[in-house]
């Protein structure tokens, strides 16, 4: 296995599954602007990893710009408060595996989420202590690939690896010029992935 100095993680579909909670939040936001609450787990899980504007294009393409603005504002506020309180479903072995990886690597989260979402993940599950930093599209306005490069440059990383569960994660890592590990237990499919983790625990076997 190639020698790395850091592991960068996607969040949804890689570290946790918060889709059930997010569906509840989104449906309430839709109702608040007069749109029928038709969001469901299968539909939203296919959108995980996308930026919120891209999710709008997929699930509510008919929403007006004003409706989108109100939904975004309500979702961001409600998600942060609700998820920080109740959390999501951590994949089996997340904390024990992070503890092992932390002994050898610097760890980061890089996601396409809104600002506050990663912080809610940390607060709900007490996992911030394992990570050296994080970045997201909601803070920088940049693509995931650019944020991976930003973290690497900012933190002085020489040989990071990115772990994600979707084709967009693979493309972002490729754009950033870093190796990719496919979390095949997550939401997506990546046919071209050369290294695959079938569980979160198996990352320890791959990286240690």
Image (cartoon, rainbow, N blue to C red):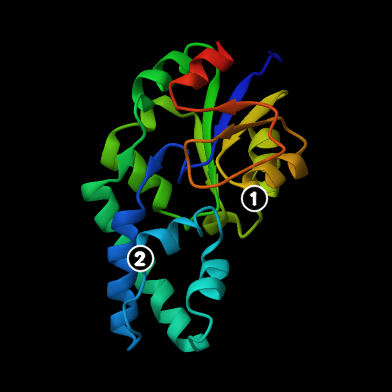
Q: Residue drawn 76% across and 44% down?
A: 175
User: Which residue matches tag 1?
Assistant: 168
Q: Tag 1's secondary structure?
A: helix
Q: Tag 2's secondary structure?
A: loop
Q: Earlier in the sequence, mark 2 or mark 1?
A: 2
User: Which residue matches tag 2?
Assistant: 40
Say if 77 sits above or below 96 in the image.
below
Give the side of residue 29 with respect to residue 105, left or right. Answer: left
Q: Quadrant of residue 173?
A: top right
* Label 2, label 1: how far apart the Cα atoms are: 22 Å
Q: Residue drawn 59% across and 46% down?
A: 166
Instruction: Decide: few, some or many residues near mark 1? Use Cα within 10 Å; few <14, some 14-19, many ≥20.
Output: some
The spot of residue 88 in percent (x, y) is 30, 45
Comparing 58 with 82, the one in front is 58
The spot of residue 133 in percent (x, y) is 50, 35
Comparing 115 with 169, the one in front is 169
Say if 16 sits above or below 29 in the image.
above
Front disc: 2 or 1: 2
Q: Residue drawn 52% across and 67% down?
A: 55
The spot of residue 92 in percent (x, y) is 34, 28
């Amino acid at each position: 296995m190639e020698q790395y100095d850091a592991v960068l993680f996607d969040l949804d579909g890689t570290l946790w599954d918060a889709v059930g909670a997010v569906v509840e939040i989104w449906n309430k936001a839709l109702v608040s602007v007069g749109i029928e609450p038709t969001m469901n787990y299968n539909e939203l899980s296919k959108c995980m990893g996308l930026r919120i504007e891209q999710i709008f294009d997929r699930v509510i393409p008919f929403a007006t710009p004003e409706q989108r603005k109100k939904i975004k504002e309500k979702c961001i506020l409600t998600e942060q408060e609700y998820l920080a309180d109740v959390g999501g479903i951590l994949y089996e072995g997340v904390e024990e595996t992070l503890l092992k990886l932390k002994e050898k690597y610097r760890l980061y989260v890089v996601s396409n989420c809104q600002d506050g979402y990663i912080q809610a993940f940390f607060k709900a599950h007490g996992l911030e202590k394992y990570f050296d930093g994080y970045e997201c599209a909601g803070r920088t306005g940049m693509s995931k690939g650019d944020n991976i490069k930003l973290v690497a440059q900012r933190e002085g990383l020489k040989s990071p690896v990115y772990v994600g569960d979707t084709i967009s994660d693979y493309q972002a890592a490729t754009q950033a010029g870093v190796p990719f590990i496919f979390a095949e237990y997550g939401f997506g499919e990546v046919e071209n992935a050369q290294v695959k983790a079938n569980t979160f625990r198996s990352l320890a076997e791959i990286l240690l």
